[in-house]
Image (cartoon, coloured by chain):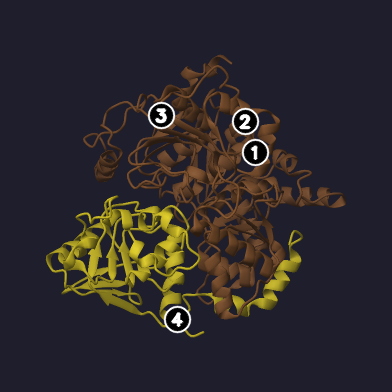
Amino acid sequence: MALEKIKQVSGTAVQVAGDDIDTDRIIPARFMKCITFDGLGEFMFYDVRKHEDGTEKEHRLNDPRFAGASILISGNNFGCGSSREHAPQAIAKAGFIGIIAEGFAEIFFGNSTTLGLPCAVAAKEDIQAIAAAVEADPSLNVIIDVESQKIRFGDAEVTCYIRESAREGLTEGSWDPIAELLEGDAEIDATAKALSYV
Amino acid sequence: MAKSLFEKVWDAHIVRTLSSGETQLFIGTHLIHEVTSPQAFGMLRDMGLGVKIPHRTFATVDHIVPTNEFAEPFSDPLADAMIQELRKNCEEYDITFFDLDSGKQGVVHIVGPEQGITQPGTTIACGDSHTSTHGAFGAIAIGVGTSQVRNILATQTLALGKLKVRRINVIGQLAPGVYAKDVILHIIRVLGVNGGTGYAYEYAGEVLDNMTMEERMTVCNMSIEGGARCGYVNPDEKTFEYLKGRPYSPSGDEWNAAVEQWKSFASDPDCNYDDVVDIHASEIAPTVTWGINPGQGIAINENIPSVENAPADQKAGVEEALEFMKFEGGAPVKGIGIDVAFIGSCTNGRLSDLEEVAQYLPGKHVAECVQAIAVPGSQVVAAQAEQKGLDKIFKEAGFEWRGAGCSMCLAMNPDKLVGDQVCASSSNRNFKGRQGSPTGRTLLMSPLMVAAAAVSGKVADAREVFGVAER
């Protein structure tokens, strides 16, 4: 099961401003009544994008200038709340290939990495600079360099942080650990045997 | 070397170190439900994998179950498809399923402990962030995503980075009318909604020592709301007393051996913590959230923060919350009118929660403008409550008495807010849209505070409404 080595991702970007954007915001629970992840993309940030009557709100995610964006920019503690993998699945299925935020909630970060969706942590002022540059020129190419932990946009470059284990997994093509977990079968049996409750 | 419970349990479950540097950790107990497991079984089939240790996975159905409709098929075809899928998967892979006709169905975090499946010194995972609840027994219990559910099904292991440990001492005595819910809402207010990122929380101190197991579960349940992936309490005599005689608890000669082993997992008195925080019980009052995350809570007698008075780094958050909640900064939280009152959820849907409220309800009645629902967390809780006549007390007071399920905590079932209704809720999240209406407004509080709001028609101090202090 060879996976793609994700050394960098790039594309145009869009900002969903604010801290503590929770997974109910990313994918409201009412859209999780499903038995596959197919089709979740169209419900990403549904209530952020739409009024209750289904008409569109004024939001960057509805703005044609940012159509086709594939890098998501947000604030601190992004993805907090529920452990639903539906959240990063919806983001990925809506066409995003990388997320830049001031910080990520633990479970969301792990879920995203397992899908090969890099989550880069950047300083508040750097995020503001990226967002301002994108606002000024929505066609600007934003690059998350996973390997060197840099974000490049136009002529500018800022430092970002991606936890070592995630960076290793992404760049080495082992972001989904299932193959390696399966290889440990004999050791799994030995561990299980030593636990009286198993 | 002296170790914390977290380190001891972690070490006992290490399989090996992975190439990423993460640990392959054995997960002894796996709990699944209908929302986050079907895709995992789908992945297993796609990859041609089986379930490695079927008897260590336990299933129930909770999120999508209607609490006022018991006949199948459910009127919602999507919900019906989900329960059918779980049934099919459990049967095909030989997994124990506490189904609707078992008498044991309920919210997964209530079912595990009451069946004795949740035990000290174990690792527990579930595709649900409130898995932290099970830490009340001295277990490492974590919420995971669906790909990780697949990993556990296929290998009974996860790839995980080790967490740091923060000990939180809650010192002193809680005043009458102050509950476990207030303790955890206060901790989250003090440490922040992301204060626990990268940490396991070890809750300790006199207040935790004095708590019942059900109260400890309420505290551990909301660890994730403080950013901590798991929270735990060291096992003690109360833990063992709770587990004795439960269906999946060890019995006979095995019981004493198990208790001895469980005791050995408690943190050593001289172990090192990455951080230690002291919280004083005297500073904890009945707490109510006014905003859109669980850290936006205040004591019942405090005023809602205003943008002007908020610290610079919180102004934007306060402004966004006030706008959504349609509340005025600087106004008292007490007196805010409510439309719905919800008692239930994995946070506060246990027998003791219902008993605590029921003792104060006789002679009171839900305000005319309020819809109040009481939802037992499991069929076992419902049966015990009904045996004690609690259902009659709730109904006489004007509550609807429902069947077991997640109900209005997250509205994946017919129980939902409508429009911008205000709900006094004993659940765990006040996120925008959480209770089913994109503009619905949630105020988190203890079950007795929910009852006080229900009978008053507005946010009220349960100590005054029910004369709590005099009892």
Colour yellow belongs to chain: A
Q: Colour of chain B?
A: brown
Mark 3 or mark 1: which is in front?
1
Q: Residues within 10 Å of mark 1 (few under 14, many from 20)?
A: many
Q: Which residue is mark 2?
A: B391
Are the numbered discs 2 and 4 placed on the same chain, yes or no? no
Tags 1 and 2 touching, CB below 8 Å = yes
Q: Residues within 10 Å of mark 2 (few under 14, many from 20)?
A: many
Q: Which residue is mark 3?
A: B299
Tags 2 and 3 touching, CB below 8 Å = no
Three-letter code for the amino acid on which mark 1 is drawn: Ala
In 3D space, how far apart are the residues under numbered discs 1 and 2 (Cα atoms)? 8 Å
Q: Where, by quadrant of the figure, is residue A90 drawn?
A: bottom left
Q: Chain of mark 1?
A: B
Mark 2 or mark 4: which is in front?
2
Find numbered disc 4 in the image and state the secondary structure of the residue it sits on: loop
Q: Which residue is mark 1?
A: B382
In 3D space, how far apart are the residues under numbered discs 4 and 3 (Cα atoms)? 50 Å
> Where in the figure is residue B140, as x and y percent of width and height?
60, 54
Closer to the chain start, of discs 3 and 1, is 3
> Where in the figure is residue B143, as x and y percent of width and height?
53, 57
